[in-house]
Amino acid sequence: MKVTFLGTGTSSGVPVVGCNCEVCRSRNVIETRTRSSLMIETQKTRVIIDCGPDFRTQMLKVPFRKIDGILLTHIHYDHVGGLDDLRPFCVFGDIHVMANSKTADMLHQTMPYVFAKHLYPGVPKINLEAKEPYKEFWIGDIPVMPFVVNHAKLPIFAYRFGNFAYITDMKTISPEDEAVVKGVDTLVVNALRFEKSHLSHMLVDEAIAFSKRVGARRVFFTHVTHEIGLHHDANDRLPQGFEFAYDGLQINV
């Protein structure tokens, strides 16, 4: 499978509006981080994880083809704010969006016009399906195993795809869910910044400790802020086998 990091930033994105730090002033494209999103592709299947407010900009940079499934982690705007921009992809048919039951229920409140009985012309045609954790399903030829992590007190979805796992917005995880991640070869996990503890996100040292516990061979950090510093300097602070992802990075898993 080919994995493309569509976005690697936190909810404010990078550059941050009104900030004059060296990261936000940088003209190096690698320092620009749109809201976190990931694309997984095979020859037959394309899956997107989270569809935030930068989705349109992100998809202009990749080949236009059918999206076979959208996996949502949770209802926060930086993860679902771009669902309306699925409209162009409806030329291939309805879009299948999958989430936990709470996220699916709340989408009916945040986007009622998408799920109305009588849809006006041009509205994105979304087939919304609530999924249960720990029950594997397939999108085309890609296996998907949802599991649960805690975003402060909010239980949200993370996903395992064979030997690859994607986790964002995690602060804590139960031993049972950590066992779901053990044995992955490649792990993408959130690491907000190096210092200043956060209520609902792991810092870099917490993400490193978690990654070592589950035994991942390759680890890529996402959902990061401008506070990590310049990309290459930040990477130099990490142990071997760890690196900060950046928008547009592609890896094979």
Image (cartoon, grey):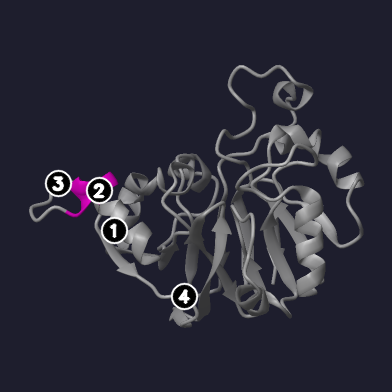
Dot 4 falls on a residue whose secondary structure is loop
Q: Is residue 64 left or right of residue 27?
A: left
Mark 1 vs mark 3: which is more N-terminal? Answer: 1
What's the residue type where badge 1 is placed?
A: Asp
Please determine whether, in this image, residue 17 is positioned above or below residue 146: above
The percent position of residue 95, horizontal first and vertical second, equals 32, 62
Of tags 3 and 4, the one toward the viewer is 4
- Alpha carbon of mark 3 to alpha carbon of mark 4: how far? 35 Å
What's the residue type where badge 4 is placed?
A: Pro
- Alpha carbon of mark 3 to alpha carbon of mark 2: how far? 20 Å
Residue bearing mark 4: 133
Quick check: marks 1 and 2 in contact, CB under 8 Å? Answer: yes
Mark 4 vs mark 2: which is more N-terminal? Answer: 2
Mark 3 vs mark 4: which is more N-terminal? Answer: 3
Find residue 121 and name its label.
3
The percent position of residue 118, horizontal first and vertical second, equals 8, 53
Residue bearing mark 1: 105
* Residue located at (9% from left, 56% from top): 117
